[in-house]
């Protein structure tokens, strides 16, 4: 089964994707993570997109479609979670064509709905384990032991350069202007499902599980 998680910055896409990886062995394909990885390893493309990402704007369709196409080549049968992709209609068209060329398709597009006001608090309090990538929050999801990752025991954590109120404003604008038209597109195709992303994390997981098991 292949799914798309769609929602504004801070909606909980990464958090739920990681749970699906652990619980169902699905593969998370996050273009945000791929781009940050390229930035950290100092590749030419990584350097090229660093400023665009820090400002909160979208990088070009060509770059992200290229990244996804590479990953699809080595995708097994586990099922994919597209997290943060597609974000434009051009990306949605390319994904459909790429999947069709592999004899596959998207089964569900899950919109995670969260109020804008809640997103600021979520984004500005987020931190991530530098070793395993587990996502935490200063108050909403702290580590059980202060300074130690619950999952891998790592003690180094990072905060994203674009997790500022200024960049979030730009990211939200990009979401409403460039990404939200996809909701109508997938609704018309009959694949859109909506979950209440304001609910507690485990309750959101239950809503997603209900969709996958139908
Ligand atoms: P990307 O990395 O995709 O970021 P995003 O879409 O802005 O989403 P986030 O990762 O910020 O949020 P999330 O929904 O995963 O929330 P999370 O689970 O972490 O993209 C970054 C940038 O890369 C873009 O701005 C763009 O420049 C570029 N890019 C990426 N893909 C692209 C594409 N396809 N095309 C063009 N450009 C692209 O949760 C957030 C916080 O809330 C956490 O602290 C978490 O603990 C907490 N939380 C989660 N769920 C809950 C809950 N239910 N209740 C309370 N707290 C919760
Ligand atoms: Zn960790």
Image (cartoon, rainbow, N blue to C red):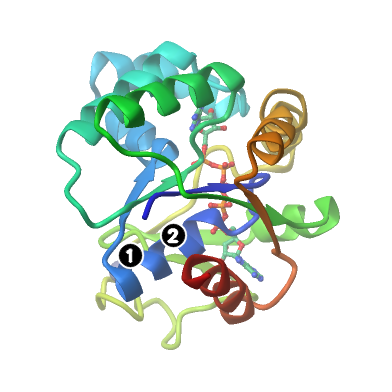
Q: Look at the image and tell me whether residue 146 can be seen.
A: yes
Quarter of the N terminus within the rendering: bottom left
Q: Is residue 113 above or below residue 188?
A: below
Q: Is residue 164 above or below residue 145?
A: above
> Mark 2: which secondary structure?
helix
**Disc 2 residue: CB within 8 Å of ligand 1:** yes
Q: Residue at x 59, y 59 (%)?
A: 12
Picture coordinates of residue 101 (x, y %)?
28, 24
In the rendered structure, the answer to whether residue 96 lies left or right of residue 148 reads right
Point out which mark residue 21 bears: 1
Picture coordinates of residue 38 (x, y %)?
28, 29
Picture coordinates of residue 167 (x, y %)?
67, 33
Identify the image quadrant of residue 201. bottom right
In the rendered structure, the answer to whether residue 101 lies left or right of residue 119 reads left
Mark 1–mark 2 contact, CB under 8 Å?
Answer: yes
In the rendered structure, the answer to whether residue 67 lies left or right of residue 83 reads left
Nearest the eye: 128 or 80: 80
Nearest the eye: 105 or 128: 105
Q: Residues within 10 Å of mark 2 (few under 14, many from 20)?
A: many
Q: Is residue 67 above or below residue 117?
A: above
Q: Residue at x 24, y 34 (%)?
A: 72
Q: In which of the image's four quarters is ligand 2 placed?
A: bottom left
Q: Residue at x 17, y 32 (%)?
A: 73
Q: Which residue is mark 2?
A: 17
Q: CA distance from mark 1 to mark 2?
A: 6 Å
Identify the image quadrant of residue 97. top left
């Amino acid at each position: 089964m292949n799914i798309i998680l769609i929602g504004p910055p801070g909606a909980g896409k990464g958090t739920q994707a990681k749970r699906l990886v652990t619980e169902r062995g699905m593969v998370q394909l996050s273009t945000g993570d791929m781009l940050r990885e390229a930035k950290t390893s100092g590749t030419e493309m990584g350097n090229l997109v660093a400023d665009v990402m820090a400002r909160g704007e979208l990088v070009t369709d060509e770059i992200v479609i290229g990244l996804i196409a590479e990953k699809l080549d080595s995708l097994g049968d586990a099922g994919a979670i597209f997290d943060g992709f597609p974000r434009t209609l051009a990306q949605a068209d390319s994904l459909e064509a790429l999947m069709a060329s592999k004899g596959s398709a998207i089964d569900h597009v899950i919109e995670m709905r969260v109020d804008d006001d809640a997103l600021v608090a979520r984004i500005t309090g987020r931190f991530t384990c530098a070793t395993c990538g587990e996502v935490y929050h200063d108050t909403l999801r702290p580590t059980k032991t202060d300074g130690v990752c619950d999952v891998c025991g790592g003690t180094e954590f990072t905060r994203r350069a674009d997790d500022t109120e200024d960049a979030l404003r730009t990211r939200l604008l990009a979401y409403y202007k460039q990404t939200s038209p996809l909701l109508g597109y997938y609704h018309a195709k009959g694949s859109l499902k909506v979950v209440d992303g304001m609910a507690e994390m485990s309750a959101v997981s239950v809503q997603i599980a209900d969709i996958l098991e139908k």
